[in-house]
Amino acid sequence: MNIVARLPRYAQLIRIDTLDKQVGTLLLLWPTMWGLWLAAEGLPPLYLVAIFAFGSFLMHSAGCVINDYADRDIDKSVERTRARPLASGAASPREAFGLAAALLLVACLLLLALNQLVFWLALAALALTASYPFTKRFLPVPQAYLGISYGFGIPMAFAAVRGDAPLLAWALLAGNLFWVIAFDTIYAMVDRNDDIKLGHVRSSAITFGRFEVRMVMLCYALTFAIATAVGLWAGRGWVFLAGVAVAAATAGYIYTLIRTRDRAGCWRAFVFNNWVGVAIFAGLALDYLVRG
């Protein structure tokens, strides 16, 4: 089969076969944009916005391929994932390796336009992304590990703009970590029954047990509290705080979707997390426009 005929399978590997699957790229993008706007005080260069937006897509896509490679045997036993190309045999591990390598090569080329500190931070982010799938075998809350990986765009954005990664950037990363634990626990709730049957897959949805909804909401509360503190530390005002309030209200709606533990509701809740990121970003960007 020629490469053109195999493109739909590669699209499925990097989650561009349906629009709702691209929410992962957006959940990676928004925290990076928070960092970029804070670092540039509301006026980031357009080339940096483009680099980090495209970079978010590339890193998420590569991460999905690596994840599918690591979980190819597990995915065969999970209802939601058994049709994925590697699990079903529609694509080979060799193809997955080549696709991931190509995506990471393009991401590395983007780094040529940035400084050395960004490069070293990117290497750390790559190491976290590549190793994350394997942490699901032994960490009780692998979502925390994923949260660190998903947040590395924040110090990278500061490094690209300012040439350093100040404490403010790491504080925002900490806030984002709790958001990732929240939305990825919801994601794990979709597959929890299958994961329990497998017996060797770990997730926060399993570890938290019957308290998982409460823990999700606690993580949202910590996210908004840290985001508020970071915004005030950076001199942001009422417009930004209004954005955080909208994000909190969005989390309240998400609660109504997950409280019954219904699979379809949990999936909708996971996808809806995009609007949490949008609300915080909009509040931040508008605050700079209105208040300077």
Image: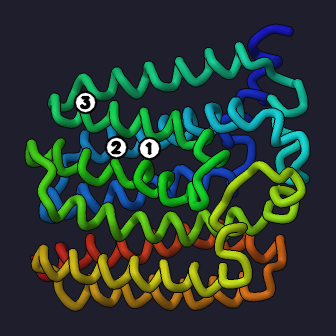
Q: Which amino acid does label 2 sit on?
A: Phe
For mark 1, give the secondary structure.
helix
Q: In which quarter of the image is residue 16?
A: top right
Q: What residue type is labelled 1?
A: Ser
**Position of residue 161 measured from the top left corner of the image (x, y, whole percent):** 14, 47
In the picture, measured across the screen, residue 272 lies left or right of residue 179, that is: right
Report the number of discs. Answer: 3
Q: Distance between the residues labelled 3 and 1?
A: 15 Å
The correct choice, above or below, for 10 with respect to 271 in the image is above
**Position of residue 96 measured from the top left corner of the image (x, y, whole percent):** 68, 22
For mark 3, give the secondary structure.
helix
Q: Distance between the residues labelled 3 and 2?
A: 13 Å
Q: Distance between the residues labelled 2 and 1?
A: 6 Å
Circle 3 is placed at which residue position? 119
Circle 2 is placed at which residue position? 52
Mark whose residue sits in front, 3 or 2: 3
Q: Quadrant of residue 72?
A: top right
Mark whose residue sits in front, 3 or 1: 3
Residue located 46% across and 53% down the image: 28
**Position of residue 169 measured from the top left corner of the image (x, y, whole percent):** 21, 59
Nearer to us in this view, 252 or 113: 252
Circle 1 is placed at which residue position? 56
Q: In which quarter of the image is residue 108?
A: top left
